[in-house]
Image (cartoon, rainbow, N blue to C red):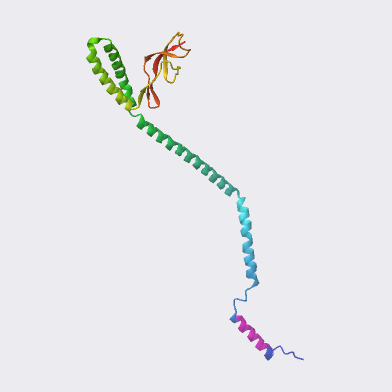
Amino acid sequence: MSVNNQPTEEQTEEMKSNETEAAQHPDEAVPSTEAASESNNEAPVGDFAEQSIDDPRLLELKKEADENYQRYLRVQADFDNFRRRTQKEKEELGQYASMKLITQLLPIVDNFERALAAAKGSEDNNSLSKGVEMIFRQLDQVLEQEGLKPMETVGQPFNPEYHQAIMQVESEEHEEGTIVEEVQKGYMLKDKVLRPAMVKVSS
C-alpha cells in the first residue's frame, strides 16, 4: 500500500500564507543566537574594567601622576615665594637707592658740626658761624627728606643693634648698661640702621 506524501491543498495554502507574513515582517524574525551573542559581548566589559584597576602597570602610572602633581605644587609654591621675595627686594631697592650717597655724606655732616662747634666758641667768627650753620641746616633738611634720622642715645639703654660701645665708664647717675656719652652720632635711614652710634656706656 503506497503512502501519499504530497501536501494537501490546505497545507499548501497555509505554507504560502506563512511565507508571505515572514516576507512582510522580516525584523520580527530575530534569531535567538544574536541575543546570546550580545549577552556574551557585554559580560567581559565589566570583568576587564575590574581587572584593569588592579593592573600593576596602571597602578604605577597612577603613582607617577600623583608624584608629578605633588612636584608641580612644590614648584608653584617656590615660584610664588620667589616672586614675593623679588617684589620686596625691588621695593626696598627703590626706598634705599640713596643709601650709598647718604653714607658718603655723613663725614661731611660730621665736619660741619665740628666747624659749627669751633666757630661758636669764638666771637670773631660770628658771621662765619652763621653762614656755616645755614649751609648745614640746608644739607640736614635734604637728608631728612630722604629719610635720614639721627639716633637718640644719651640716657638710653645700650643696644648692640644700634650702638657701638667704645668705652665703659663708672657712673653714679646711670644704671649699668646705660649710654652716658655719645662720641659719634648714629643714623637711621627710614627703618634701617645706616650707621651705629659710637657711645660710652656705664659699668
Indicate yes or no whether the magenta region holds residue 8.
Answer: no
Q: Which of these two is toward me, 105 or 41?
A: 105
Q: Residue at x 50, y 41 (%)?
A: 73
Magenta stretch secondary structure, dominant: helix
Q: Residue at x 63, y 54 (%)?
A: 50
Q: Residue at x 59, y 81 (%)?
A: 24
- Left-right relation of 79 to 135: right
Picture quadrant of residue 165: top left
Indicate yes or no whether the magenta region holds residue 20.
Answer: yes
Picture quadrant of residue 38: bottom right
Q: Quadrant of the N terminus?
A: bottom right
Q: Is residue 201 above or below residue 192?
A: above
Q: Which of these two is toward me, 78 or 203?
A: 203
Residue 99 picture location, percent across and down: 34, 26
Residue 130 picture location, percent across and down: 25, 17
Q: Which of these two is toward me, 62 or 144?
A: 144
| Start-end of magenta stretch | 11-22
Residue 91 picture location, percent across and down: 38, 33
Q: Is residue 24 above or below residue 151?
A: below
Q: How many marks?
A: 0
- Left-right relation of 180 to 29: left
Q: Residue at x 65, y 88 (%)?
A: 13
Picture quadrant of residue 185: top left
Q: Which of these two is toward me, 79 or 169?
A: 169
